[in-house]
Image (tube, rainbow, N blue to C red):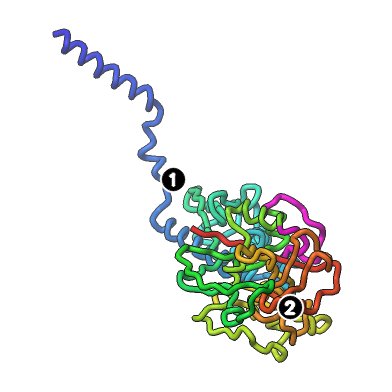
Amino acid sequence: MKKILVSLFLAFFTLAFMWFLFKGKGHFSSKETKKFASEQDWVHLANAIKKIHYLWESGDYPYLGEMPCSADWDPEYVSRDILKCNAEVLECHLNYQEKNGLVSIGQVQDSVFLRKNNKFISKDKNNDGINVTFLFGDNEIKKVNLQSRCHETYLPKGKYTYSPLNMENALDNIDREESKQWINDKEIFIDKFLVTRKDYNLIMNKKLKNSERSYFPVDDISIKKMHEYCRVQNKKLLSAKLYDAMTYSDLAKINLFEDITKISCNVIYSKNCIGKKELKFQDTNNVSWMGTYDIRGGILEAVDNENDKDFNVVSSSFYFNSDSFWHNLTHRFQWNGLGHREVDFRFISSVTGEKLKLIESNDIKVGFRCYREI
């Protein structure tokens, strides 16, 4: 009998507790369900996400010339590719169309909006992408992450050659690079572009000295700061070995000793081009076989040379005429990594060990890029 009474008491207590917990919420099943988005609402949301994702990855923005913040990416100076996966440009585009903190996406009758929370876009801490918030249906909210796949390119696994210019160059007992075959068995992703001033200021939370345009490469810092920038992003400064792999491959069929004297300034910006044409970065005419930009001409590029530490600057640049030996791909000389004056460089050829024509300047510009491996 006692067991029956105890069981009844527990059952009564449980029912009383549940009644108290849900008191006043009896309308949930009839009214709250109306706030859930319909199947058609989800279809409209999916179409809206597709439209934003296309803008994000393609950089194909309407009204680009009318946007008030567009001066920094003038197509005369930077490639349209810099618009791809660019949070600043997408934010500018959305601000241009904003009405009361919302931007309508797709057909007006679909009632799908991007909602502004201080900004339309927030950077995602877990990847190189962004988060955007959609408002749809009957005040339904959905946060969507758009990842960035635009600023890196993949180095296929396989066999590559470090310092291919020295592959059959039998010069001993001189200061030069020694050619080596190596096999890439890792997942390696290389930055497509040289690091820009905009990138550096954003990641390092610093303000570099003023430059003509923020999407121009960082070209006036030490190699130590280059390493720091890459390390903050869990990356490394591009190595000479990987630079050679991204610019020369047996599959690429590139002539390392190509005569560039007749090549247009649109393709290789050499010393001959200064005063004739504006230098353009992120240029689709100046791309390696695997999709990395600005590989010849323009500014110098620093690399981390683990095999021959002294040869750490890729030489092809606007400091040399188009007929210069320095334009041969994978050709390097020496930099102390500290300053940008003429005395900070030794113009010793990584190929022959010879001292070649130097750069007569005390403001020698050196850019860089990073890579990561999995």
The amino acid marked with disc number 1 is Lys
Classify residue 263 as left or right of residue 168: right
**Location of residue 47 with respect to 170 vertically, above or below:** above
**Residue 363 rendering spot, x and y as whole percentages:** 83, 67
**Residue 88 rendering spot, x and y as whole percentages:** 66, 59
Query: Count the marks: how many?
Result: 2
**Location of residue 177 with respect to 98 vertically, above or below:** below
Q: Residue at 60% of width from left, 73% of height from top?
A: 178
**Residue 86 rendering spot, x and y as whole percentages:** 62, 62
Residue designated by label 2: 354
Distance in Å between CA atoms under marks 2 and 1: 76 Å
- Toward the bottom, the furthest residue is 262
> The magenta stretch spans which residues?
203-223
The reply to whether the magenta stretch includes residue 310 is: no
- Toward the front, the furthest residue is 173
Res 106 visible: no
Q: Crowdedness of circle 2 by 10 Å Cα count: few (<14), some, many (20+)? A: few
Q: Residue at 57% of width from left, 55% of height from top?
A: 130
Q: Residue at 34% of width from left, 21% of height from top?
A: 17
Q: Looking at the image, which is closer to me, 342 or 198? A: 342
The amino acid marked with disc number 2 is Glu
Q: Which mark is residue 35?
A: 1
Dominant SS of magenta comes to loop
